[in-house]
Amino acid sequence: MLAQARLGPGRIHHCMRWLGQSQRAFDMMCERAVSRFTHGSLLSEKQTVQNWIADSRAEMHAARLMTLHAAWKMDQVGASASRDEIAMIKYYGATVLHNVIDRAIQTYGALGYSTDMPLERMYRWARAARIYDGPDEVHRQTVARHALKNYSPSEVPSEFIPARTIAAKEKFAGMLEFLEAESV
């Protein structure tokens, strides 16, 4: 029971460390992008590299906000009631870490995957982060199961426009009749 109670705070701690590692890889990627000149321009002027930088920054920002929210919710209602938020940051944060490091390695090319750069070691640990503390698939499954509890089956989709139109006409029949009488 004690070990189970420590999982939530431990996972949040992992995510905080992953954010720091992601930032370190991001900084290395950006430094390389503004330094490496190839095929007539700097890497930072290449659209693909710009996309990698923008995507990495957005993903890190989202992971940071998700981690802060999970920690806040855990402080407010406890780890058990924050299970979904903690599960989401565990798999999302690990994926962001992996993606950012992967893009940084791409920016460096062979040098990025060599042991001359810390990215190679970071990459191995990032891949492991998606397995330890429960594989990502288990956490995704938990989140999906909890989300699906809020829905019930429906013969006709709830957003089916013809059915919604009929329901609206029935609901507002009196008002429609009044408006039609007024306009005559």
Image (tube, rainbow, N blue to C red):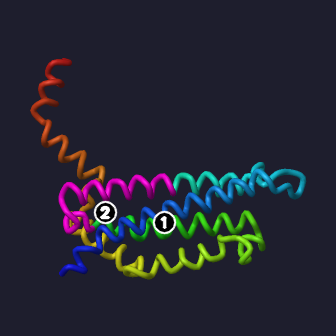
Magenta residues, start to end? 60-83
Expressed as whole percent of the image width and height from the top left, the position of residue 151 reads 22, 64
Query: Which residue type does callout 1 highlight?
Result: Trp
Q: Residues within 10 Å of mark 2 (few under 14, many from 20)?
A: many
Query: Which residue type does callout 2 highlight?
Result: Glu
Say whether marks 1 and 2 touch (CB < 8 Å).
no
Residue 152 appears in the figure: no
**Residue toward you, 39 or 132:** 132
Residue 18 - label: 1
- Image position of 40 with respect to 143: above or below: above
Q: State yes or no: residue 79 in magenta.
A: yes
> How many marks do you count on the picture?
2
What residue is disc 2 on? 85
For the C terminus, give its image quadrant.
Answer: top left
At x 55% / y 70%, what residue is drawn?
98
Expressed as whole percent of the image width and height from the top left, the position of residue 79 reads 23, 66
- Image position of 30 with respect to 120: above or below: above
Q: Nearer the viewer, mark 1 or mark 2?
A: 1
Identify the secondary structure beneath mark 2.
helix
Quadrant of the rendered image containing residue 107: bottom right
Per the model, the C-alpha gap separating discs 1 and 2 is 16 Å
Task: Give the side of residue 40 with respect to residue 50, left or right.
Answer: right
Q: What is the magenta segment's predominant secondary structure?
A: helix
Identify the secondary structure beneath mark 1.
helix
Task: Give the side of residue 44 with respect to residue 183, left or right.
Answer: right
Quadrant of the rendered image containing residue 27: bottom right
Expressed as whole percent of the image width and height from the top left, the position of residue 122 reads 59, 73
